[in-house]
Image (tube, rainbow, N blue to C red):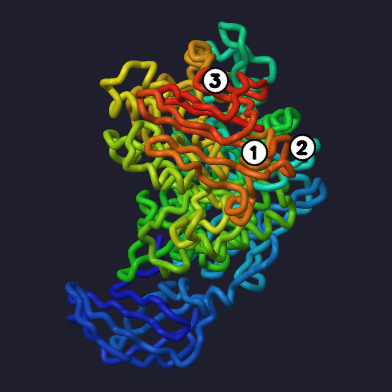
């Protein structure tokens, strides 16, 4: 409850500039002078009125102080009639001066040991902060006054063992008390209402040695969702929809073939990318786990999601089970990428960030309202020093504590270039093989265009991969127009674009026609969790075709992802024609829409085997995965073949693998095409029916007939 009734309002908008708003209902909005006093009612500063601006319901006064107020102390603004109001923290918190004055480089959050536990929270605008501590067994509550230190950091130490205690923070800001969960919490209660004190040493695992990953283009990324991966009734998984289910290594479907993790291993991918695993809203952990959500509603960034745990009420279970899953994947030689969502929070008004430092962690437009480039109501202000620090600290926490191998940044274009480059630098200082990729869409957020970490600024984001929408829409057709067909679906108008994106989107002949400086920046894909699956699109735009042609179109597009220069990215189930029954945005659709249909995999085993063969071909020779543009320009060229067939040759590449010359051919048309192959004795590793490292047949300098909607790989 506020201690005074405010007749007017005063906000500190810069260190010495304040704004006073007087409603016309109070002395007709007029005051000829103001003064400022401190919390002891002693005069603090003279106030000079710089301007008066009439608004619809009040008079706005812009005023200047003669001294800097101490942020975190209480002040009062007094008008000529003796009325007073508290000085509230306004736009000052979004100034560079505030950032520089209060940037804190040290650790925040909780540091636990049996002897003592220390708490630190950054809350520079708070006048008081209290620690609310709740005993694990009895529920007894303790309130402790925290101590303000330098840079607006508040701390307190409990000198006894408080393992499993719940805690929250109580902060007085602008004369209002608010309760918040520590944004640096590493464990929370059932539905995230409180942080929980745990001993992380009890959860430690050891990361096994992994196969070498010399460059990002060696990766083959397989995107999935914890629940989707195993929830199918016939997945053969015991812990369906859980971390531990994704860790099971002997799972089989009704046909006796592998499912889940062993299937991903057998398919040949190198990385499993999981949709968000941090604690998110949209799923009630106390329910029967019928709720479904992709996880893009972030609540607690450093805590695993509880609904994927076998016991969400146990603060240790979700941590230990996620670590067990990651270790199981590592034990099989695969790596783990986390989809991270630092661009926004679920609801900014109730987020820990807004409660602890109101107005600081989110961008505001020119009118003072929260910006909405994300489309979900708020944009995280990554350019502010303590917001950037949080992202860096959080990324490093997942890298060190959970031993993950890379990050996929959701809506990376909302974040700023400096933050992303610091993420890359920091992560690679620990693990040079870690993959960092993101969605570099150009979004309407109020930072300068040249500061956004989007695809237009890729030249200033070395070592960070970007989802290549040019590749996506060229090969399959527009994502946002179901009826638009891409090259793989027979649209010859995409012919020249297809040749560019297959060469890594670097501008093969002319750099200025390229999108990237390096193939390591190009994440090649035609399908992801977002939007319609490729199969659902084909069902619409190729509805008149028979099923054989549809499946061949689908397979051709997938093969082009895998044999193009760059980083290939597959949506789980893409290789067996995953469908979401026509639903393009399934973020909270039921399991029947989202699950991986392992029975569908069994029915399309021949297509899965073909994709597996293409993956083995890619992995067998480094010429398919050059790490820089110079190597592509030296060894990659297109054969003189007429539209619609595309053929490229990788020449003089024996130092990169066992073959010296490689030819790749794509025929998207529904009729046979004939061409003459270059001189030599060629081994055909892939034709329209099978693919792998065992040659299908030998051919010499002769005419080769390409079957309708097909792909071929020849080596010599």
Residue at 59% x, 60% y is 462
Q: CA distance from mark 1 to mark 2?
A: 30 Å
- In the image, residue 433 sits, relative to residue 38, either above or below, namely above
Mark earlier in primary sequence (1, 2): 2
Q: Nearer the viewer, residue 694 or 273?
A: 694
Q: Residues within 10 Å of mark 3 (few under 14, many from 20)?
A: many
Which residue is label 3 attached to?
Answer: 608
Residue 573 seen: yes
Secondary element type, mark 2: loop
Q: CA distance from mark 2 to mark 3?
A: 25 Å
Is 627 displayed left or right of 506 in the figure? right
Q: Which mark is residue 210?
A: 2
Q: Which mark is residue 578?
A: none
Q: Nearer the viewer, residue 494 or 225?
A: 494
Is 395 displayed left or right of 115 in the figure? left
Q: Which mark is residue 661?
A: 1
Q: Quadrant of residue 244?
A: top right
Residue at 56% x, 62% y is 419
Front of the two marks 1 and 2: 1
């Amino acid at each position: 409850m506020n201690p005074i009734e405010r007749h007017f309002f005063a906000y500190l908008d810069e260190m010495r500039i304040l704004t006073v708003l007087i409603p016309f209902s109070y002395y007709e909005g007029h005051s000829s002078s103001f003064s400022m006093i401190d919390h002891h009612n002693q005069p603090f500063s003279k106030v000079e009125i710089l301007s008066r601006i009439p608004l619809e319901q009040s008079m706005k006064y812009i005023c200047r102080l003669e001294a800097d107020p101490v942020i975190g102390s209480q002040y009062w603004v007094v008008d000529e009639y003796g009325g007073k109001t508290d000085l509230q923290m306004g736009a000052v918190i979004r100034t560079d001066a505030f950032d520089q004055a209060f940037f804190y480089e040290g650790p925040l959050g909780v540091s636990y040991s049996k002897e003592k536990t220390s708490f630190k929270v950054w809350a520079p605008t708070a006048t008081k902060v209290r620690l609310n501590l709740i005993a694990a067994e009895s529920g007894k509550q303790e309130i402790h006054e925290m101590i303000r230190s330098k840079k607006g950091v508040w701390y307190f130490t409990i000198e006894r063992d408080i393992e499993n205690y719940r805690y929250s923070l109580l902060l007085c800001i602008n004369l209002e008390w608010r309760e918040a969960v520590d944004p640096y919490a590493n464990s929370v209660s059932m539905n995230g209402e409180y942080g929980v004190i745990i001993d992380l040493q009890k959860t430690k695992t050891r990361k096994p040695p992994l196969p070498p990953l010399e460059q990002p283009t060696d990766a083959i990324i397989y995107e999935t969702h914890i629940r989707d991966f195993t929830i199918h009734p016939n997945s053969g998984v015991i812990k369906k929809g859980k971390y531990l289910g994704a860790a099971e290594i002997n799972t089989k479907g009704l046909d006796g073939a592998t499912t889940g993790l062993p299937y991903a291993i057998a398919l040949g991918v190198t990385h499993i990318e999981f949709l968000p695993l941090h604690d998110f809203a949209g799923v009630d952990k106390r329910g029967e786990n019928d709720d479904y959500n992709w996880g893009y509603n972030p609540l607690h960034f450093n805590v695993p999601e509880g609904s994927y745990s076998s016991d969400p009420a146990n603060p240790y279970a979700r941590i230990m089970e996620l670590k067990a899953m990651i270790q199981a994947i590592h034990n099989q030689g695969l790596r783990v990428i986390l989809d991270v969502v630092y661009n926004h929070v679920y609801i900014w008004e109730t987020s820990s960030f807004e409660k602890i430092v109101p107005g600081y962690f989110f961008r505001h437009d020119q009118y003072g309202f929260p910006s909405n480039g994300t489309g979900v109501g708020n944009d995280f202000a990554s350019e502010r020093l303590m917001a950037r620090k949080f992202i860096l600290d959080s990324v490093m926490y997942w890298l060190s504590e959970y031993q993950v191998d890379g990050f996929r940044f959701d809506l990376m274009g909302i974040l700023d270039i400096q933050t992303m480059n610091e993420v890359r630098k920091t992560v690679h200082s620990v693990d040079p093989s870690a993959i960092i990729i993101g969605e570099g869409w150009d979004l309407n957020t109020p930072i300068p265009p040249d500061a956004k970490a989007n695809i237009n600024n890729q030249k200033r984001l070395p070592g960070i991969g970007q989802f290549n929408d040019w590749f996506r829409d060229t090969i399959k057709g527009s994502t946002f127009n179901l009826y638009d067909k891409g090259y793989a679906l027979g649209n010859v108008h995409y012919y020249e674009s297809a040749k560019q994106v297959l060469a890594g989107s670097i501008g093969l002949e002319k750099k200025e026609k390229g999108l990237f400086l390096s193939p390591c920046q190009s994440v090649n894909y035609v399908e992801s969790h977002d939007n319609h699956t490729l199969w659902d699109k084909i069902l619409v735009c190729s509805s008149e075709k028979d099923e054989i042609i549809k499946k061949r179109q689908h397979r051709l597009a997938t093969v082009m992802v895998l044999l193009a220069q760059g980083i290939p990215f597959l949506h789980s189930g893409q290789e067996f024609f995953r469908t979401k029954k026509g639903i393009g945005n399934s973020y909270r659709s039921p399991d029947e829409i989202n699950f991986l249909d392992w029975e569908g995999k069994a029915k399309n085993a021949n297509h899965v085997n073909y994709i597996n063969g293409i993956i083995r071909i890619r992995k067998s020779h480094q010429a398919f995965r050059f790490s820089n543009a110079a190597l592509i320009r030296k060894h990659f060229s297109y054969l003189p073949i007429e539209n619609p067939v595309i053929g490229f040759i990788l020449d003089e590449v024996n130092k990169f693998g066992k073959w010296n010359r490689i030819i790749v051919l794509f025929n998207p048309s529904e009729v046979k095409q004939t061409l003459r192959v270059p001189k030599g004795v060629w081994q055909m590793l892939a034709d329209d029916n099978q693919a792998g490292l065992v040659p299908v047949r030998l051919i010499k300098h002769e005419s080769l007939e390409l079957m309708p909607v097909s792909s071929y790989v020849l080596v010599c």
